Amino acid sequence: MAKPKVSAVMKQGKLTPWLYLLPALIVMGFFIVYPMINTVSLSLKNKDGTASAATTCKEGEPCWGIFENYRYALTEELNTTTFETTWQSFWESSYGNTLKWIVFMVSGTVILGLLIAVLSDRVRYESLAKAIIFMPMAISFVGAGVIWKFIYDFGTSQVQIGLLNAIITGLGGKPISFLSTTTLNTFMLIFVGIWMWTGFCMTILSSALKAVPEELQEAARIDGANEFQIFFKIMMPIIMPTVVVVITTMVINVLKLFDIVYVMTGGNYNTEVIATRMYTEMYKNFQTGRGTAIAVVLILAIIPFIFMNIRRFMAQEAMR
Amino acid sequence: MRKNILLLISLLLVISVGLSACGGETEEVTEEVSEEVTEEVTNELGIDCMGAEAGDEVSILSQWSGTEEENLNAILAPLADACGIVFNLESTRDQALLDTRVQAGTPPDITFWNVTQLSQYEDLLVAMTDLGVNTDNYADYWKDIGTVNGKWLGLPVKADPKTLIWYSPANFEAAGYMVPTTWAELDALVEQMVADGYVPWSLGMESEDATGWTGTDFIQDILLVTQGPDYVSGIIDGSIPYNDPGVKEAYEIYGKWAMSETYTVGGAAGTVSIGFNDAILKVFSDPPEAMMVKQSGFAGGTITGTYADLVYGTDFDFFGVPEAQGLQGGSDWMMSFSDSAAVKALVAYLSSDVGGEKWAEVGFDLTPNMAGADAYTDAALLKKGQILSSATGFVPDIGDSIPSGFGSAEFTGITDYVNGGDLDAILDSLAEKQAEALE
């Protein structure tokens, strides 16, 4: 084989890169683009996909024409008689629950992850601590759901098999049914999510923290700053880009979250989130139009965060 | 050299893992046929093979696994031996699996599923009358339920009456209670139990995805007592909306018991969190946490599964819900997507006298096939069989019969109600779902 000339190798035709990409583009087109388009088109039709959604309108009720499924997805859970009831029903709806999940789980995992990353940095048994915190990530969501379902178990007999209720009764209290008490249950589920994902945030934030130059911290200590000031005024601004990436990734994860809610309560007792609602409409009620409409709403909610994530990512790439 | 050997070994490992993953599918499918197929196929039982040849395959999808699958295998064994048919059984409880296979155009030859599927797959199923079924062995009300638009599409193979209340005769005797024969007596008995300091009911309804089904079963039984089977059939075909006052009354009767700690174990929180199996066992624990549990026939198996030394008749027994006009029951239906000779042989066998007797002998719940009525070997099944054959009507479960997800909406509805939801709002939304599902 004669060695090709250097110039011939460098000169690729305009078409060649596309040929290299073609297999990946075909796979993506078939498995991602086509289903996306199909989902959107199904969301504009009725439950069988046979006629336009406008045909499912009922007389005497508000109708959004071809977007009837979206009207169902966005307003069905809301009781719009007064502002009071709308506010109340919003917080019990899947959107309200998802909002609670986003606010509490994201802040919980990021803050806890950051805290553990900072603290474990200064201890000798750092790798052991990090390994323990990271272990829950190795379990599937469903496995975690089953484990915590047993921990939250509520029994009526003298013997409690749920760990939390056993502690409560051991201290002399009455057992609480965590998963069916509507005020408590979403937060109990969020706690399971935090338990699982803190390891992820901790790992990423820990590597970001280690990239903060030591000299800056020492210089600050010499200047008389205490540890809190060093953390908030020096370390946080430097790792801020990473924190933003972690936050957006966690928001995307939380918006998609389905397994924990499905395994532990099945979406009952006001714990529904968008993903469980989508599953219920598609596979339990067999309403293809409504299920896909909820899926599209979910996609639209996630897109801004993906956008932020990618912009952040590309800005970091540009900095190299 | 060492690198090459390591590479070869890892390649072999990957290939073998890949092959075992591919081969794994057939491992899950249990083959029915015994190795004696190579012998001459004997047919002393008079089983008609309807032209099927040895080695013909029938793929079956059902919801039965474990002991239930073993029972099915035992029932099919004579047919497999006589005609050499190979049955490939698959089991799943996930209806989405059956739906996607049917939609994809690769349905199983036969499926044992619920009665709603008869209407759902109406266009794809082969009528029983084209498959050589023996019509004489089935009561009219069974044939009616299995008929969609004039075609008999489903063969009822298993029935499990749900309108039963399980109790401990030993505990009743010790407390001086009699088995009630009218609804008023049952009510009075409940009040008596409360006065004596016992908890009358164990109403746990937790069941993961299907949480609430024991509640809806109870509601339907109350409707059979207060309104009768025609009313229930009216709900199933949509002529009676779900928010009718009769239904509301039934919910209130149930709610009075299910939401109060004096009437049921754990009150409302207990009802929604206690699993249905645990609820059965609470009546027979020592000391018992409750006196009665309303549950289907399978409860007997649950009791002996945990308390193996309890004896049917003295330690646990059941009585029919008093004054229920007609029976509510779970039923499993065989429906066929194919008309091959082997399938015809299966239909003919199960609907024949031999098939009915075999089903009863194996004891896989009750068989609607009248030929099996006297062949039960288990005392409890015999008593249930008598209740079934003396029933004036058989009403399938409302949730199982109304298509399009009404069943799960019903479960969520009753769970909400017991957990403190507004009954009128819940019943209204269920009536809407009922109308949508049946239009």
Image: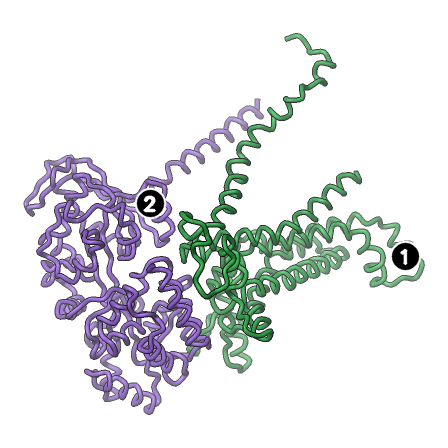
Which chain does the numbered disc 2 sit on? B
According to the image, label 1 marks what residue? A220
Front residue (pair B18, A305): A305
Number of numbered callouts drawn = 2
Q: Is residue A79 left or right of residue A59?
A: right
Q: Where is residue B376, by image quadrant?
A: bottom left
Q: Where is residue B432, by image quadrant?
A: bottom left
Q: Most extreme residue toward the bottom, as rendered?
A: B195
Q: Is residue A283 left or right of residue B363?
A: right
Q: Which chain is green?
A: A
Q: Which chain is purple?
A: B
Q: Most extreme residue toward the right, as rendered?
A: A223
Which chain does the numbered disc 1 sit on? A
Res A159 seen here: no
According to the image, label 2 marks what residue? B102
- The amino acid pointed to by label 1 is Ala
User: Considering the image in quadrants, where does the C terminus of chain B appear?
Assistant: bottom left
Rendered residue at 22%/71% (across/down):
B229
Q: Is residue B230 left or right of residue A252?
A: left
Mark whose residue sits in front, 1 or 2? 2
Residue B162 in the image: state x and y as whole percent: 25, 69
Rendered residue at 35%/54% (across/down):
B93
